[in-house]
Each structure stands twice: as structure tokens, then as C-alpha cells.
Amino acid sequence: MNQADICHAYQIMKNGGLKDENIIIFMYDDIAKHVENPRPGIIINHPEGGDVYAGVPKDYVGDDVNVNNFFAVLLGNRTALTGGSGKVVDSGPNDHIFIFYSDHGGPGVLGMPTFPYLYADDLIDVLKKKHVSGTYKSMVFYLEACESGSIFEGLLPEDINIYATTASNAYESSWGTYCPGLYPSPPPEFYTCLGDLYSVAWMEDSDKHNLRTETLKQQYQLVKTRTAVNDTYLFGSHVMEYGELELNMQNLFLYVGSNPANENATFIDDNSLSSFSKAAVNQRDADLIYFWHKYQKAREGSSHKLNAQKELLEVISHRLHIDNSIEFIGKLLFSSKQGSEVLKTVRPAGQPLVDDWSCLKSMVRTFEAHCGSLSQYGMKHMRSLANICNVGISKEMMAEVSAEACISIPASQWSSLQKGFSA
């Protein structure tokens, strides 16, 4: 669903008049031609939507989608690239930059299809360097990920001409939408969610409005309402904004263009986007939806059924292993009574997740060395690892309790460290 979001965003910009030379795409690109794609070569982002994959540039795909290349592209540093098309953000002081990032996430961290993952402190450092270089007039950052608010909370300066919105606050999940078994559901041949709620909200708004007149603030308010599911927050999250908020009075056209077909569309304050009371799935459970429906739809007694069952059991086993390991580590460090309380502590709004980011990365590496990869699911425990740092636990103590908590690691792809550490 993340790749569908990225492809859809490209179509908005392309229809808005932007040239490919001014659009840079990062996506793993393993969906369109995957053997399990019911429509080979096609990606959809809506149950009744058309192909959003057509014409999408393949600037950085596969293993070229990594933190190093992302930062090099953003800073316009071609010499730091490893693979890919070579396109970078070669911007000047009068340029407006738009970044849309959609992936899994956790407190203080964003997913990548490769290791290591992207950490908030490193991203903020790069954004500051971009500002110091004087190579943009303003920047807008739309971020789709669980706990995405933690990437900017207490970290993004308010005076570097950057405005950011996130799918969720610093301590809640974001949501997938157009999922099997829900309404509206994808076509019956699909057993995956087609998109993410926040992403679908801003893009479906962009599809139908005149972005020459609609402001970032107007879109933010619409997206916030839809993603909150009419302010109930049932199957929804708190869309947030950070940075230089005054920039949200600018028109969206400056960043993503505007489709000429929408030039007669008039934006009024009571515009609304479709909202569905039970149309979303916690983003972290979207893979369970996929594996469960894959198992359900496989023919009884077939090898496909057995393989699907094996995959489902492996992912559940991995989740239980990660959850139980973190919980046990908390008890070993802080006692059975206080362990859960310490690990789940949420800092006051405006404070960053952790004081020492190097400590957090060290704790991640130590945990994974003894307990296996956190993986995309395990990102949810980044707050626990950050809190271990915040109370002053040493790396040596963390290694000792991790070794005690994790006598063995389930042998599956979910626990593999063949690709490296998350930090």
C-alpha cells in the first residue's frame, strides 16, 4: 500500500504539470510484477481506481532505496550516491520542495526496504544542512507512518522554512484503508489493503480540487477530519503539523502543481472528504490481513494452503517473540511491577523521544544482536528502547539482560539479520 501511495502521488504531480526531471521517485518496486499481484503490471490505490503505476519513473528501486541515497538526493550530492538514476534535488534559493514519505515507522524511526532504517535525528540534521545551503525557498513534508509525529516532535525548528504534516501523533499508529473485509473493500481478487488513510485522504482531495486556490491549511483541515473519522478517532489517528506553520497559507500548486481539469473546482470551508466508520486497519496489522486472506483463499489441501499457513504462523511467532522479549527485558531492568510503566512512558508534548540518539541506536543494535531483527513490526518498541536510554541504562547492562531474555531466536525470515541491523 505504501508503493501505491507513492505511485498515486506521482500521478497527481504529473497531472499537475510537473516534469519528470523535477520529480524523484524512491520505491522498492516489487509489487506491480509480483507473482501474487492479481493484475500484473498494475497498481491501484482505490477500489474503483485506475492504474497508478503507469509511467512512474524508476529513479531509485530495490536496494538503491536506502538512507544514504535519500539523504544524498535531498542534499543534491551526486558524489555520495550509490546506484539509481543519479537524479538529485538540484534546487536553488527560489525553489519550493515537496517531500512525500510513506512507509512503516515507529517512535523516532522510519522504515526503509533496506537496513539501516531512517532515524529522526539524522533526518532533522539533513534538513538543517539543506537550509544552511540556501537551496530552497520553502519545503513541505507530508509523512505517512506509525508514530510519525515523533519524527518532528521537539526536533523540527520553526525557522528554517519547512512545514510538515504527519499521519499520526508521536505515540499512535497510522491506518491502512480499502482493506479486505471492510467497507469499501478492494476488488475480490485482492487480499491486501490498497492504501493508507492519511495518504489517501490528501491525494483524493488533490485529485478533485483546484490546487491553484486551495491552501495547505485547507487541505490539512480536510485530511485531519477524514483521518480522525469525524473526530471519533475510531480506526483513525491525529493528523499533526510541525515547523513553520505560517507556510500553510500557501497554495498547494506551488508544491504539487494543479490538474487543469479541476480549474473550475471551487474550494469552500464546508468541503468534506468521504469518511467511513470502519474502513481502516491499524497499519501494523495490515500484513496480518494479507497473510490471513492469503491463507483463507488458498485451496484446501493444496501446497499454497500449507505455505500460507506457515507464513501466517511465522509472522505471529515473530510478533510474540519481539513483544515478549521487550517485556521480559523491562522486568529484568526495572522489576515486574515497574517494567511496563517505564517502557511505556510518553514524554510531554514538545519533547523529543530521546535525549541521546546514539544511545538509542546502540540499544537497538544490542537488542537485535541477542534477540533478532525488530523488523517493521518491532519498530513499535522504539519508545521502550528510548526510555531505557533516558533512565541511564548502560549498553553493557542492556546486553546482559538481552542475552538472558533471548535464549533463542525463532528461525524465520522475520528474525533474520542477514540484511544487517536496523540501526
Image (cartoon, helix red, strand yellow):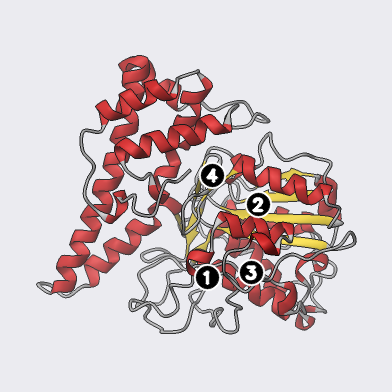
Gap in angstroms between the C-alphas marked 3 and 1:
25 Å
Give, as a three-letter code, the residue at label 4: Val
Percent from the top left, x then y, of residue 63? Answer: 48, 65
Gap in angstroms between the C-alphas marked 3 and 4:
27 Å
Tell me the tag on residue 61.
Answer: 1
Position of 384 relative to 194 (above/below) = above
Secondary structure under the numbered disc 2 in the rendered image: helix
Percent from the top left, x then y, of residue 412? Answer: 24, 53
User: Label 1 neighbourhood size at 10 Å, few (<14), some (14-19), many (20+)?
Assistant: some
What is the quadrant of residue 326 in the picture? top left
Name the residue that disc number 4 marks.
Answer: 109
Residue lying at the far right of the rendered structure: 94
Q: Nearer the viewer, residue 190 or 19?
A: 19
What is the quadrant of residue 11 in the picture? bottom right
Give, as a three-letter code, the residue at label 1: Val
Badge 3 or badge 4: first in the primary sequence = 4
Give, as a three-letter code, the residue at label 2: Lys
Horizontal side of residue 236 vs 224, given as left or right: left
Q: Are the residues at dot 3 and dot 4 in contact (C-beta closer than 8 Å)?
A: no
Gap in angstroms between the C-alphas marked 2 and 1:
31 Å
Q: How many marks?
A: 4
Residue 118 in sight here: yes
Front position among marks 3 and 4: 4
Gap in angstroms between the C-alphas marked 2 and 4:
22 Å
Tell me the tag on residue 224.
Answer: 2
Gap in angstroms between the C-alphas marked 2 and 3:
13 Å
Tell me the tag on residue 204.
Answer: 3
Front position among marks 2 and 4: 4
